[in-house]
Each structure stands twice: as structure tokens, then as C-alpha cells.
């Protein structure tokens, strides 16, 4: 319920105060009061006078409607959280109006409700009380806690009804309640060791709320019981000469108390004789009476032992009993053995019958009790030999071996014939001295030592161990390496051995690629006399380490970049090239995998990680593949730990056909050269007619001269057929020649624009006096339309199968000096500069004339079969003519085609 308490106004009109109260836990929206109405303010002027709450006095628990002045609960209020145990809990708020300024203070008291029950700190409360505690003894209990205040706070305690305790509830000066447990009746631990009650705390709310805890009263023992024996007098029989430690009697006394009050200690009474104390003993903890000395029937047949039992509690009272020990007569004198002389050690080479010891045997008994039988126990290489009367000698009875037994315990037993028979035994220790009769033996005949290559010189690699069953100097082993040669050098330059420990050390750093394993002998020798030794074989196996990176063998290119053409019509799976690599390591260190690291962002290619084949992953798309070049970075990685890798750069060029890819370099250069030649167009047109006429005249003259000299084959090669198709030329040479030509008779020169990448390089061309003055370009090769059609297959030839064959073919140039010597611009010079000789293998199909002239199609054809093993339909499918890739007719017309020039020496 919300209660309006007071309205206090200060007459100066500046400050007024109003107070409200609200119960805790009130729901959101609960009305506290109307500040405007209670202050008598005009509700219609609240907005105009800017009625508002002072910002720094706001509280999240209360809110004011600034339009009508209503104060309501904005958030549930927990009094215990805000004010803890404070008796008064108050929230303050200030509101004001302007024109004129009026400030109002609003106090809201939070009224406590009984929303919390009392609670104990622990659910189980343990109180320990001695059973000797007197009635009226008080024991304070832990107090319960109730966060509520006022009438809702903790009011009293209660306990389960019982006959032993009651509660006395008291109030402290601060008003808090606490309870004391008061003992009403004496406790007896032996009857009930623990008492359990329910302790209840009750608050003053309406209705009251409670909290409970389990009160456990443990009764502590007091020493109120005396030990009790089973019987006051014990009678036992004991044979005379009972050995020390023989049990005479096990006493047992009980005490109802617990702990130290019930722990009993046994002892002899003070009034027993010293002789009894010498003959018997009692264990103070167990009450076990044992024989301590030699009990002799002839000395006394009865002994009386008085024993007392006492607990360890305070004011202990002892209990007493008497033990009567009756001694029975027996054959109580055992034989006695006396050794006169004993040899400490005997050599393992001692002969049988060697005397070890001399002894005598006696028995104080008479007749049968004094008759003695003597023997040696166990299976030992010794025997007894009677000397005279009661003297015996111990002698060896067989060969000795110290390695099997370095010492023997010889036990001699003397037994009389009494009833019961008595026996005496004595033992001596005989040491067997060592002789050097065992050679050292290695733990294994062959040691396999695995050493990782690139080891640190001087590093420990293994240990050989030899064992010698001898002792002393006879077992002192020294190790050595037997001399032998490894790769022409002493083994001692490879490994060394510690002569004392047998540790092997590497004297050099091993290289698996140079030496995979080697074997040598080690010897172990003892220091005995004579010296004995044995040998063992050590096989050192060098373990490969991943210390060699893969080496890319193919494809090779200039400046580390291989160029590969890719037709735009290539199907998915088209073989672009194959990366060939090798690794000097072995095993997993040499197992290679291939991957594309860069340049394949649009997914044009895929790489077979095992074979290194680079293939297309999809068709070439004009939209997705606008660029003409793909600069791929191929990584070759081995599987060592850690892995090593190398990379190869492959420049893949998009071409309309494979043939275009061969001439792509020329076209790139000529494109840049166009602008430079446009200014010469008029001059070239004028010169073209003149050159054509001169060219025709020269051809006629040469034809006549060739006819005269019967060199029809050379004339044929000078025609356009030879410029584009040398196989027919060489074929006609083979059929028609009567004189074998040499390279000194001709000079074949090719001129072309070579483009590598984006740079442009112009190959210098020799000019002939007979051709150069009237020809637009003395290096053009003119051919008929029919002739160009015959070689149109060059533009459509398929991709080469093997990248290495492509590289070898590229090494061969169509230019030849014809003089036998390599000149710059000649094929001989090109091959020499590139450092390759493998290009010659590609000309296995040429005739001698073709090899001399360098014109046959077969000279340019790589010698390889298709990947499927079948013979291709036409060798032209694998034909490669450097500088002769297909060029559009329009480009040929502009003077960008390849050409050949042949100079023929004049004949008389």
C-alpha cells in the first residue's frame, strides 16, 4: 500500500518537500503518488513551466510523468540490495518548475516486506561435547541470518524435543538473536556416541518464515572404564630350550573407552624376578609373551609371570593377571659344531680333494641323544671326509667355475638321535677366485649403426658393448678398431672409438649421396694373462637427409622462363607442357609433387601433382581470358622434413593455333615495327616493281646455269618450293644429282623478326649485290598461292607431345652459313651459344644432302612417337620450322614473312 505521509512547504516559495512510502518488490507501473496534485500545482501549467526532474537526482527505480506529475515504480525495488541491513531505506528525488523557479524535494521510503527466510551458514552444524560434561553447560551455536529488518527479521530459534538439551535464545545489544545449547542430562558415549536434532530459525513476519539446519552433537569419550582380562590366571606348557621368540601366551584385555582411553599397554609387574625378565618378554601393544632366553628344564620346571594392563587415558587404573609357565623336559642339548680352520677362497682351477675347512662336532647329551650324524646340505661341489673321532674335513668334490658361482655357502648339519632329534647347523662362505678363462664377448655380432648425413664431426653415433664374465684385470676390456680402407682411406679417418667405453664417434660429416654405408671391425681385449679378445662387425648406414632441393630439368627457357603456346581451340585436358624435375635425395626426400603457385587465379590450368603435367582445366573463353599471356609459377616440392622446393616459370601464350604460337614472337615485333615503316610505303611500292623484275631475271639466269652444271636440285631449292617445303627439294636432289654438293657451295640465310616477350629484336641480314638494289626486301621469299596452300598445315599443327622435344627443336635454326663455320645468326652459332648439342638428334631422318643443306622437312621434324604409341597420319603434324610459323596473308604482303637466301658461287 502506498501511504502519503507529509507535505512540508517552505514559505519562501523556493523549496518544498514531500514524502512517500512504497513497499519493496512492487511491480512496474505501481503508483507512488501525484507530486503535482500533492503540492497543489496547476496541472495545466506543468508543460509551460517546464516541469522536470533534476538530472543528478534520478533513480532507475522510480519515474515521474512530466505531463501530469504522477510518480510511479519504473523498476522492481529490492530493499536488501539497496540498503542492506539498514533500518531505514530511503530514495530521494528533486523536481523543479521555472517562471518562477520552484524546487521540490521528494523522499520515498522503501518499506521492507518479509521476502527472505532465515538461513544458517551451513546445513550441518557439529558440536562436540565430552561425556564428562555436567548439566547446565552451555554451548553457543552458529547464528542464522535474515536479510529482512524490523518485525520481519530473525525472532527466535527452536530445536527438536529431546531429553538431553534445550535452547536458550538471547538478544545482543544490536538486537540480533543467537542461541545457546544447554545440557540438561549427563551424556554417556558408550550408550550413544552422537545425537542429531533439527535446529530451526524463525523470523517475525506474517506469516513467519523459517530456516533449518541439522545439529549433530558428538559425545567425546572420557576415561571412565578400567581394562579387564579374560581370566585372572593363565596356565601354559613350554618345552625346554624353546627358541627365542617362541610364543608363550597371547594375552587379551578389553577397555570400553575409545581413543587413548581405550588403548591398552601391557607390562610385567614390578615384583617379578629378574630371571623371569631374562627368559621372557612381553609386547606392550599386543600382550604377546615370548621366550627371550634359554629355558632349561634342569634349571626350573615352573615359572610365574605377573602381568598388568593399563590404558593411556588420564588417571588410568591398571588391571592384573598371573601366567603359570610349566617347562617340559626334552632332548634339549643339540650338537655343537666348531670350525678349526677355514680357507677363505679357492681357485676355480683347484683339483678335486682340495681341503677347504676342518671342523669338530660335539653333543653334551649321552647315549642316543649324544650320537651325531653330520652332513652337508644342498647341491654343492663339496663333501665331508671323516678324519678321526669327531673331526671332519670339507674338500672339493668336482670342478669349480667362478663364472657360474663365485661363492658357495657350505652348511654343515649335525643331528643327534634323541626324541625328538636335535640338529645344529653352521655355514661358511667359500669364495672362488677368478682365472682368465673367458674372452670378452660382444652383445651382438653385427651392429647396424644409422647415422644421419651432414652430422657434426666428432659426434657420438653408437656404443658397442662387450661383456667378460671374469672379474678384476681379467674383465678389464679395451676397445679398438681394426685397420681397413674405405674408399681408399683408413677407416680411422672416418670413425674413432673410446677404448674404455666403446663409444663410437664420427670423425667427418657423412654425405649420403657420396657414401651410403661402410663396414669395419671392432675388437674387445681383456687385460688378463694371457690376453683374450673377440671381434664384432659394425655396419654404418648413412641415413639420407633432405638436403637437396628439387632441380627442374624441363622445360628450359631463356632467363629462367619457358614459353609455351596454347591454342584458343584447345579442349579441356589439353597438355600444355610437362615439368620434369629430379631430386638427388632418396626415398620420401626425393618424392616430388607439383603445384601451381601463381598465375592461375582464373582456374585456366590444372597441374597433376604426381607427373608434373600442366593441362587446361577448361576451354579458353574470350570473356574470362582477355589476356594473351599467362605467367605461371610452378613449384616442385619434395616430401622431406622439412620439405624443400624449387620453382619454374612458364609463360603460356594464347594463340589461334600452335603454329601461330611459334611465330608469335615475330608478329609481336612486327606490330611495333609497322609504324616505323609506314613512311616508306611509297618507296617500297616503287621499289617492288624493280625488285620483281630483277628477281625474275636472276631466276632465269640461275636456271640456265643450274642446267649447265647439272645442279637442278639447287635451282629447285632456290624457288619458293624450297623456301617453304624442303622435303621435295631434297627428294629431287636425291633423284637427279650427279655431283654431291658440299656446304661450301651454298649459303642459306634466314631473316625474320624475332620477338621474345614484349621486347623486339631484329636479326641482321646479309644483302646480296645481285638482289639488294632492286628488291623491296632482299630476304622475302615469294611463293605462289598454291605453294602457300601446300604448307598451310603449319598453322594448324597440334601441340607437341613432349616439352623436351620442343626445346630441342627450338635449338635448331633454319639459318646456315654454308661454310662449315659458325657465324652470328647461323644455326651453328645459335646452337653453340645456347650450350646444347642435343638438337642434332632431331635430324636422324635426314639424308646426307639434307644434312648438308639443312632444308629437308625431316631435318626439322622431332623424332618422337605420339603419346598413344600409334604412328601419326602425317609427319607434318609434328613439324616445326623455326621462323616459319603461319602468318596471315595480309602480313606476308606487308613483308613480315620468313625468307631464305642462297648464294651460289659462280662456276667457270
Image (tube, rainbow, N blue to C red):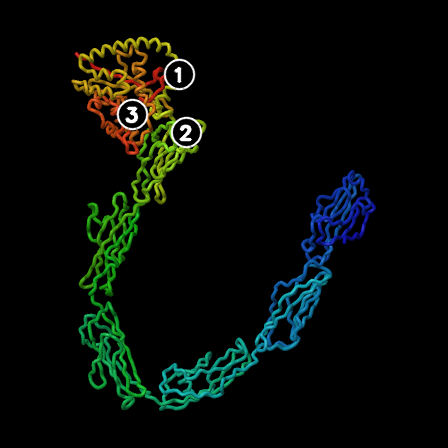
Residue 791: which quarter of the image? top left
Q: Which residue is mark 2?
A: 620
- Distance from the alpha carbon under mark 1 to that under mark 3: 35 Å
Task: State whether residue 659 is above or below residue 499.
Answer: above
Would residue 738 be visible to someone looking at this image? yes
Q: Which of disc 1 and disc 2 is earlier in sequence?
A: 2
- The residue mark sitting in front, 2 or 3, is 3
* Mark 2–mark 3 distance (CA, rounded to whole Å): 25 Å
Q: Is residue 626 left or right of 512 when viewed as pictured?
A: right
Is residue 174 shown to the viewer in this render? no
Tell me the CA gap for discs 2 and 1: 31 Å
Residue depicted at x 27% and y 88%: 370
Mark 2 nearby-residue class (10 Å; few <14, some 14–19, many ≥20): some
Q: Nearer the viewer, residue 897 or 47?
A: 897
Which label's residue is closer to the chain start, 1 or 3?
1
Q: Where, quadrant-wise, is the N terminus in this rendering?
A: bottom right
Q: Residues within 10 Å of mark 3 (few under 14, many from 20)?
A: some
Q: Earlier in the sequence, mark 2 or mark 3?
A: 2
Q: Which residue is mark 3?
A: 876
In the structure shown, which secondary structural element does the residue marked by tag 1 occupy? helix
Q: Secondary structure at mark 3?
A: helix
Residue 89 rendering spot, x and y as whole percentages: 72, 54
Q: Which one is closest to the eye, mark 2 or mark 1?
A: 2
Q: Residues within 10 Å of mark 1 (few under 14, many from 20)?
A: few
Which residue lies under the disc numbered 1? Answer: 675
Measured as percent of width and height from the top left, residue 499 is found at 25, 56
Q: Position of residue 863 (x, y in %)?
A: 26, 29
Q: Are marks 1 and 3 in contact (CB under 8 Å)?
A: no
| Circles 2 and 3: CB atoms closer than 8 Å | no
Amino acid at each position: 500500500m502506498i501511504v502519503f505521509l507529509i507535505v512540508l512547504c517552505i514559505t519562501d516559495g523556493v523549496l518544498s518537500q514531500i514524502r512517500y512510502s512504497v513497499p519493496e518488490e512492487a511491480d512496474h507501473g505501481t503508483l507512488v503518488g501525484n507530486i503535482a496534485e500533492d503540492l497543489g500545482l496547476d496541472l495545466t501549467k506543468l508543460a509551460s513551466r517546464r516541469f522536470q526532474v533534476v538530472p543528478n537526482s534520478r533513480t532507475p527505480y522510480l519515474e515521474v510523468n512530466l505531463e501530469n506529475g504522477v510518480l510511479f515504480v519504473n523498476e522492481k525495488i529490492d530493499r536488501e540490495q539497496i540498503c542492506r541491513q539498514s533500518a531505514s531505506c530511503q530514495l530521494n528525488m528533486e523536481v523543479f518548475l521555472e517562471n518562477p523557479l520552484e524546487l521540490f524535494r521528494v523522499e520515498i521510503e522503501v518499506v521492507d516486506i518479509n521476502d527472505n527466510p532465515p538461513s544458517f551458514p551451513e546445513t550441518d552444524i557439529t558440536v562436540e561435547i565430552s561425556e564428562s560434561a555436567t548439566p547446565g553447560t552451555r554451548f553457543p551455536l552458529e547464528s542464522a541470518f535474515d536479510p529482512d529488518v524490523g518485525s520481519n527479521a530473525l525472532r527466535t530459534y527452536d530445536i527438536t524435543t529431546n531429553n538431553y538439551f534445550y535452547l536458550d535464545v538471547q538478544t545482543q545489544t544490536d538486537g540480533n538473536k543467537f542461541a545457546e545449547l544447554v545440557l540438561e542430562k549427563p551424556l554417556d558415549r558408550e550408550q550413544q556416541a552422537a545425537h542429531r536434532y533439527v535446529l530451526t530459525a524463525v523470523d517475525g513476519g506474517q506469516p513467519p518464515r523459517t530456516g533449518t539446519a541439522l545439529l549433530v552433537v558428538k559425545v567425546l569419550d572420557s576415561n571412565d572404564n578400567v581394562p579387564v582380562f579374560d581370566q585372572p590366571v593363565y596356565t601354559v606348557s613350554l618345552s625346554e630350550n624353546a627358541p627365542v621368540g617362541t610364543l608363550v601366551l597371547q594375552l587379551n584385555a578389553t577397555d570400553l573407552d575409545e581413543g587413548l582411553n581405550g588403548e591398552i599397554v601391557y607390562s610385567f609387574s614390578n615384583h617379578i624376578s629378574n630371571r623371569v625378565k631374562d627368559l621372557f618378554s612381553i609386547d606392550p601393544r599386543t600382550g604377546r609373551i615370548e621366550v627371550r632366553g634359554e629355558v632349561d628344564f634342569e634349571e626350573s620346571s615352573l615359572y610365574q609371570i605377573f602381568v598388568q594392563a593399563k590404558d593411556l587415558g588420564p588417571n588410568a587404573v591398571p588391571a592384573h593377571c598371573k601366567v603359570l609357565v610349566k617347562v617340559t623336559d626334552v632332548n634339549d642339548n643339540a650338537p655343537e659344531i666348531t670350525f678349526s680352520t677355514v680357507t677363505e677362497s679357492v681357485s676355480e682351477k683347484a683339483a678335486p680333494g682340495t681341503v677347504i675347512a676342518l671342523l669338530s662336532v660335539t653333543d653334551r647329551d649321552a647315549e642316543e641323544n649324544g650320537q651325531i650324524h653330520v652332513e652337508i646340505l644342498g647341491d654343492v661341489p663339496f663333501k665331508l671326509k671323516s678324519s678321526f673321532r669327531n673331526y671332519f674335513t670339507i674338500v672339493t668334490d668336482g670342478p669349480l667355475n667362478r663364472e657360474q658361482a663365485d661363492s658357495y655357502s657350505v652348511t654343515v648339519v649335525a643331528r643327534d638321535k634323541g626324541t625328538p632329534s636335535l640338529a645344529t647347523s653352521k655355514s661358511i662362505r667359500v669364495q672362488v677366485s677368478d682365472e682368465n678363462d673367458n674372452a670378452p664377448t660382444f652383445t651382438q655380432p653385427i651392429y647396424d649403426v644409422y647415422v644421419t648425413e651432414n652430422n657434426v664431426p666428432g659426434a657420438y653415433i653408437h656404443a658397442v658393448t662387450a661383456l667378460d664374465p671374469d672379474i678384476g684385470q681379467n674383465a678389464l676390456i679395451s676397445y679398438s678398431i681394426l685397420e681397413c680402407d674405405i674408399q681408399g682411406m683408413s677407416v680411422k679417418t672416418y670413425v674413432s672409438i673410446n677404448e674404455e667405453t666403446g663409444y663410437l664417434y664420427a670423425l667427418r660429416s657423412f654425405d649420403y649421396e657420396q657414401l651410403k654405408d661402410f663396414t669395419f671391425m671392432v675388437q674387445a681385449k681383456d687385460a688378463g694373462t694371457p690376453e683374450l679378445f673377440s671381434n664384432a662387425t659394425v655396419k654404418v648406414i648413412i641415413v639420407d637427409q633432405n638436403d637437396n632441393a628439387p632441380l627442374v630439368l624441363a622445360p628450359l627457357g631463356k632467363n629462367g622462363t619457358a614459353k609455351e603456346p596454347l591454342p584458343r581451340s584447345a579442349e579441356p585436358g589439353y597438355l600444355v607442357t610437362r615439368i620434369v624435375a629430379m631430386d638427388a635425395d632418396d626415398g620420401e626426400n626425393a618424392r616430388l609433387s607439383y603445384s601451381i603457385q601463381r598465375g592461375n587465379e582464373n582456374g585456366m590450368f590444372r597441374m597433376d601433382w604426381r607427373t608434373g603435367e600442366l593441362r587446361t582445366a577448361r576451354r579458353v573463353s574470350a570473356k574470362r581470358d582477355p589476356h594473351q599471356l599467362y605467367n605461371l609459377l610452378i613449384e616442385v616440392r619434395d616430401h622431406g622434413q622439412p620439405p624443400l622446393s624449387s620453382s619454374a616459370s612458364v609463360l603460356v601464350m594464347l594463340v589461334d593455333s600452335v603454329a601461330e604460337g611459334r611465330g608469335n614472337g615475330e608478329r609481336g615485333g612486327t606490330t611495333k615495327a609497322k609504324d616505323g615503316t609506314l613512311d616508306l610505303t611509297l618507296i617500297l611500292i616503287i621499289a617492288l616493281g624493280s625488285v620483281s623484275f630483277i628477281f625474275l631475271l636472276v631466276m632465269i639466269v640461275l636456271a640456265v646455269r643450274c642446267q649447265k652444271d647439272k645442279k637442278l636440285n639447287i635451282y629447285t631449292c632456290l624457288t619458293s618450293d624450297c623456301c617453304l617445303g624442303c622435303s621435295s627439294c631434297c627428294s629431287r636432289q636425291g633423284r637427279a644429282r650427279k655431283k654431291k654438293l658440299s656446304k661450301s657451295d651454298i649459303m642459306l640465310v634466314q631473316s625474320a623478326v624475332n620477338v621474345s616477350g614484349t621486347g623486339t629484336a631484329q636479326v641482321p641480314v646479309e644483302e646480296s649485290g645481285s638482289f639488294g638494289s632492286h628488291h623491296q626486301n632482299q630476304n622475302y621469299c615469294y611463293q605462289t598461292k598454291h605453294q602457300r596452300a601446300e604448307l598451310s598445315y603449319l598453322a594448324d599443327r597440334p601441340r607437341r607431345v613432349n616439352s623436351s622435344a620442343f626445346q630441342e627443336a627450338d635449338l635448331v635454326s633454319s639459318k646456315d652459313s654454308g661454310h662449315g663455320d659458325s657465324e652470328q645468326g647461323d644455326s651453328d652459332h645459335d646452337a653453340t651459344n645456347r650450350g646444347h648439342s642435343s638438337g642434332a638428334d632431331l635430324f636422324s631422318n635426314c639424308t646426307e644432302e639434307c644434312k648438308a643443306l639443312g632444308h629437308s622437312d625431316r631435318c626439322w621434324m622431332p623424332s618422337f612417337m605420339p603419346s598413344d604409341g600409334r604412328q601419326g597420319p602425317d609427319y607434318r603434324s609434328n613439324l616445326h620450322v623455326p621462323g616459319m610459323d603461319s602468318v596471315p596473308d595480309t602480313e606476308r604482303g606487308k613483308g613480315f614473312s620468313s625468307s631464305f637466301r642462297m648464294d651460289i658461287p659462280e662456276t667457270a
